[in-house]
Amino acid sequence: MLMPNFSYVQPKTLADAIKHLSSDGARLHAGGTDLLGCLRDDIFPAKKLVSISQLKDLRGIRQMKDGGLRIGALSTLTEVAHNKMILERYPALAKGALEAASPQLRNQGTIGGNICQKPRCWYYRGEFHCLRKGGDRCYAYQGENQFHCILGSGGICYITHPSDTAPALVAYEATAQVAGPKGTRRVPLAKLHVLPAEDVKKETVLRPNEIVTEILLPPPVQGLRSSYRKVRARQSWDFALAGVALALKFNGDRVEKARVVLSGAAPIPWRSKEVEEAVTGKRLDADTIAGAAEAAVKNAEPLDQNGYKIPLFRGVLEEELAAIAGIY
Ligand SMILES: Cc1cc2nc3c(=O)[nH]c(=O)nc-3n(C[C@H](O)[C@H](O)[C@H](O)COP(=O)(O)OP(=O)(O)OC[C@H]3O[C@@H](n4cnc5c(N)ncnc54)[C@H](O)[C@@H]3O)c2cc1C
Ligand code: SF4
């Protein structure tokens, strides 16, 4: 398939970029690693691409006065994966960025694009006019669904959220700074993504003329231990079959507060309140870990071909909780 015809602009100011994005058929272009594939495969149309690459304020990673971190939305995944402050204070995010895609794609792809990328369902990416494209059915439900979700579909759409950085950002309680025609607003990462039951045609709460300008991470919490684990079919590059971002605040040997976010499980980065409840206030011993792993999948609703994800998630949770507890 050839690229469709569209105009291309590279505004120099945020206000200009927002103005361009407000015109009919405009699409935001960051690194283009996802967007250009979608256009080439005719998944959605575009009349105008608005590149944000000239917006210098959207670059850079720096510490804020409160001790937190500000990551410009144009920071590449490579920059996020290797930044010293992120590696030391937010290791789950560094790992998520490092495990996303291939080295070439990480050099080009941005963190803003990573959290806003389109789903990877092969029917959606193919020539199927499914519910998410405005059609009348989900082709995955009775089709090839081995990589689809086991939680949160609402019986409507069975995508898994493709981002490896978003689960860690939700676990760290990060916020997206968003600019639009009416000014700026802050959206907690935990509220950025949209479930099929809310709107099957949208992946995020952003309007077409809104831009994520930066991601804000709160200051590191004393006693916080965090990690990201991703299981994939191929070692080279692949999206998560199952994964988990953990951010557990310990008081002595007990978990005082927990944020547990699954990847490869649901249409959005899936906060597992069941696991959080199972570990909060507890020592992470073998019984607690086994109970938490079970809790992760207790509400799962597998399709015909993805039942293997249930033991997979149980195993990932068991291993990752044991590792964070220092059991092995
Ligand atoms: C072969 C392949 C394998 C991949 N594997 C993985 C993987 O394992 N894990 C993973 O996490 N990702 C994976 N990806 C996705 C990749 O990480 C993303 O394509 C990349 O991070 C997107 O960044 P970008 O800057 O290129 O976004 P673009 O392609 O420019 O944009 C992607 C989408 O986000 C929107 N967008 C971009 N920036 C902003 C912003 N600042 N504000 C609002 N909207 C915005 C665009 O309008 C577009 O809809 C893979 C991609 C490919 C092609
Ligand atoms: S899972 Fe969602 S994106 Fe995939 S075919 Fe079904 S409705 Fe479309």
Image: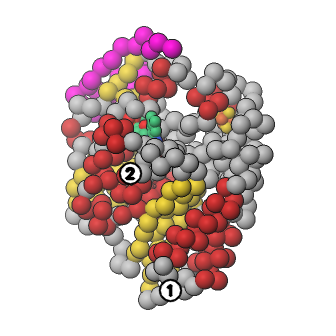
Return the residue nearer the eye: 248 or 106.
Answer: 106
Place of residue 159 in the rendered image (x, y in percent of width and height, measured from the top left): 63, 42
Secondary structure beneath dot 2 equals helix
Within 10 angstroms of label 2, few (less than 14), some, or many (20 or more) residues? Answer: many
20 sits to left or right of 276: left
Is residue 19 in the magenta section? yes
50 sits to left or right of 280: left
Place of residue 39 in the rendered image (x, y in percent of width and height, measured from the top left): 48, 21
**Residue at the (65%, 76%) spot, across then down:** 290
Q: Which residue is mark 1?
A: 254
Place of residue 40 in the rendered image (x, y in percent of width and height, measured from the top left): 48, 20
Place of residue 189 in the rendered image (x, y in percent of width and height, measured from the top left): 46, 53
State the residue lying farthest toward the bottom.
Answer: 252
**Residue at the (65%, 30%) spot, across then down:** 123
Q: Nearer the viewer, mark 1 or mark 2?
A: 2
State the residue lying farthest toward the front.
Answer: 235
Quarter of the render that holds ligand 1: top left
Q: Which mark is residue 234?
A: none
Q: Which mark is residue 97?
A: 2
Q: Is residue 185 above or below residue 181?
A: below
Q: Is residue 183 visible?
A: no
Within 10 angstroms of label 1, few (less than 14), some, or many (20 or more) residues? Answer: some
Is residue 280 in the magenta section? no
Q: Amino acid at mark 1?
A: Arg
Distance of label 1 from label 2 (alpha carbons): 29 Å
The span shown in magenta is 1-27
Q: Is residue 143 above or below residue 232?
A: above
**Residue at the (30%, 43%) spot, across then down:** 76
84 sits to left or right of 132: left
